[in-house]
Image (spheres, grey):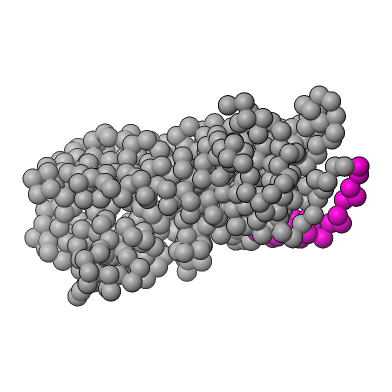
């Protein structure tokens, strides 16, 4: 314990060798775990700033070879805690998949940690001087957050900017997106070390940087409060009914239980009250759209309104995870197919070949896996403003909100967060949905199978929710849409350019003059 304490508080000694001692790597891992406490469901964003500040200090003082290992250990702690929900899908049918759960967590944590370690190592190779290496490491972490949304189909989960989702600072996503929030996080963590002066006691040396971080926080907080104080457009005169059947994932496809859940959907949909559209969650029923021509009129008759529901469908030998829009008489108005599928969950890379030896995507209930739909689009029904549908996983990708042929007036996310357990996954998924509303300036309506269903306005504020594990419905007016945001027009590119500029300046900066026996740069 004494070695761990010394490793945390004496980062300037991290200079020799390529692979640091175990105690130092353990300290880095602990910093990653502490940093992850800023994410949902904890929300201790101050812990993230403090832990990342120490980590950047250590990375700046580390040798080039050691920087990789320090970032790898810290990333393992960050992703190990923040994405611990990854074991939950394997525990739905533990007798079949349970043995995979620890491997999934380890592989996910290592994979995420490499997204930290490799850019940090590359940045350390091209810079000299500990301050320059700190700046380069900070830029590398910021670029890592951005790249994770694209590489290998993308997984922009647990970004450092997500810590602000439940604070006024989140409103700045309207200008810079979630990656802009990461810029704020990493800048605040960088300033104490960057502005450090050799003074005794040490706290006096970091005080200027701490004050600068507090100033940056205050500015972001004030800007967020100012945006929240601006009035939103009036609500539409349209009432949406969101139905949450609480169909537990391990029972969802059981023939007897699926009948119980279907009756819940029907009963909740038919309860008295005005509704202009009824919304059921992702894969709400256990039958294919193509196999239920007689059931569809019964479903809409029970709803007493047009119905939007998540349902699987077949087209020849292809199967799709879809959202179907049914008219009041049960006719199929239009169908949207999920296009950004979960690797290994909804489809298998090289799936046709692997299916021959019995390896299939375990989340798909029909066929060997789902096929991808055509891409983002806007749907409409008579009497309803056009909306953009997102099915579950698609809502974590902000880029899907941009480049549409027409602007929707709201976003509809149907999801089945029963796969994510009840600890962190559903709360993190909801937090990201709130950021999509802020980024786009559009209200987001969320129908979740087991929760958390929600009505989210264009400021990302929760107007109504149905908690995890609750059976019920929400009747709510559709909130109004704001004007297109700056982020919709510019996307992440200003933040990416800032990160590249910081990296370039760190590279171009002259090597500091070494004095005496201090060879730390």
Nearest the viewer among 246 and 326 is: 246
Q: Residue at x 55, y 55 (%)?
A: 115
Query: Can you give x and y, in whole percent of width and height, for residue 131 in the image?
Result: 79, 47
The part of the image, by quadrant, that contains residue 358 is: bottom left
Q: Is residue 50 above or below residue 290?
A: above
Q: Residue furthest top?
A: 201
Q: Residue drawn at (25%, 50%), measured in percent from left and top?
A: 97
- Residue plotted at (54% across, 54% down): 114
Q: Is residue 176 visible?
A: no
Percent x, y for residue 280? 25, 49
Is residue 423 found inside the magenta-colored segment of the image? no
- Relative to residue 82, is residue 504 depicted above or below? below
Asked if residue 307 is positioned above or below residue 201 in the image, the reply reads below
Q: Is residue 504 located in the magenta-colored stretch of the structure?
A: yes
Please identify the dominant SS of the magenta region.
helix
Residue 56 lies in quadrant? top right
Q: Where does residue 9 sit, x and y in percent of width and height?
A: 69, 31
Q: Which residues are magenta?
A: 495-516
Q: Nearer the viewer, residue 91 or 408?
A: 91
Q: Is residue 112 left or right of residue 90?
A: right
Towards the viewer: 449 or 293: 449
């Amino acid at each position: 314990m004494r070695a761990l304490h010394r490793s945390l508080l004496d980062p300037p000694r991290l200079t020799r060798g390529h692979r640091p001692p175990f105690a130092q790597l353990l300290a880095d891992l602990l910093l990653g775990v502490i940093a992850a406490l800023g994410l949902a469901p904890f929300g201790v964003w101050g812990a993230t700033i403090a832990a990342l500040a120490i980590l950047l200090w250590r990375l700046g003082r580390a040798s080039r070879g050691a920087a990789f290992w320090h970032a790898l250990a810290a990333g393992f702690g960050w992703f190990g805690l923040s994405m611990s929900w990854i074991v939950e899908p394997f525990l739905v049918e533990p007798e079949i998949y349970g043995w995979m759960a620890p491997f999934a967590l380890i592989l996910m944590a290592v994979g995420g940690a490499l997204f930290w370690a490799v850019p940090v190592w590359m940045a350390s190779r091209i810079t000299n001087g500990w301050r320059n290496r700190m700046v380069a490491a900070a830029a590398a972490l910021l670029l890592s957050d951005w790249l994770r949304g694209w590489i290998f189909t993308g997984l922009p989960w647990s970004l450092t900017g997500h810590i602000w989702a439940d604070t006024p600072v989140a409103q700045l996503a309207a200008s810079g997106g979630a990656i802009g929030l990461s810029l704020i996080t990493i800048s605040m963590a960088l300033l104490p070390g960057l502005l450090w002066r050799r003074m005794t006691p040490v706290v006096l040396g970091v005080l200027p940087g701490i004050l600068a971080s507090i100033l940056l926080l205050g500015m972001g907080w004030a800007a967020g409060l100012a945006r929240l104080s601006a009035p939103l457009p009036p609500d539409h005169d349209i009432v949406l009914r969101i139905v949450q059947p609480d169909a537990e994932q391990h029972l969802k496809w059981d023939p007897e239980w699926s009948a119980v859940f279907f009756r819940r959907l029907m009963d909740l949909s038919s309860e008295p009250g005005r509704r202009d559209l009824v919304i059921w969650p992702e894969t709400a029923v256990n039958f294919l759209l193509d196999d239920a021509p007689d059931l569809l009129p019964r479903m809409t008759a029970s709803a007493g309104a047009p119905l939007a529901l998540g349902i699987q469908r077949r087209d020849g030998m292809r199967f799709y995870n879809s959202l179907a829009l049914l008219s009041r008489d049960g006719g199929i108005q239009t169908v949207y197919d999920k296009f950004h599928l979960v690797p290994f969950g909804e489809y298998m890379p090289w799936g046709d070949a692997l299916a021959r030896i019995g390896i299939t995507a375990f989340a798909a209930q029909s066929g060997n896996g789902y096929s991808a739909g055509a891409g983002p689009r806007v749907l409409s029904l008579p009497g309803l403003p056009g909306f953009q549908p997102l099915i579950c996983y698609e809502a974590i990708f902000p880029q899907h909100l941009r480049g549409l042929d027409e602007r929707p007036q709201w976003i509809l996310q149907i999801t089945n967060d029963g796969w994510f357990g009840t600890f962190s996954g559903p709360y993190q998924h909801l937090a990201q949905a709130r950021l999509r509303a802020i980024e786009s300036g559009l209200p987001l309506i969320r129908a979740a199978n087991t929760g958390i269903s929600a009505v989210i306005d264009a400021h990302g504020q929760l107007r109504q929710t149905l908690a995890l594990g609750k059976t019920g419905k929400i009747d709510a007016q559709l909130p109004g849409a704001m004007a297109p945001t700056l982020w919709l027009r510019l996307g992440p590119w200003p933040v990416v350019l800032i990160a590249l500029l910081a990296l370039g300046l760190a590279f171009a900066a002259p090597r500091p003059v070494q004095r005496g026996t201090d060879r730390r740069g």
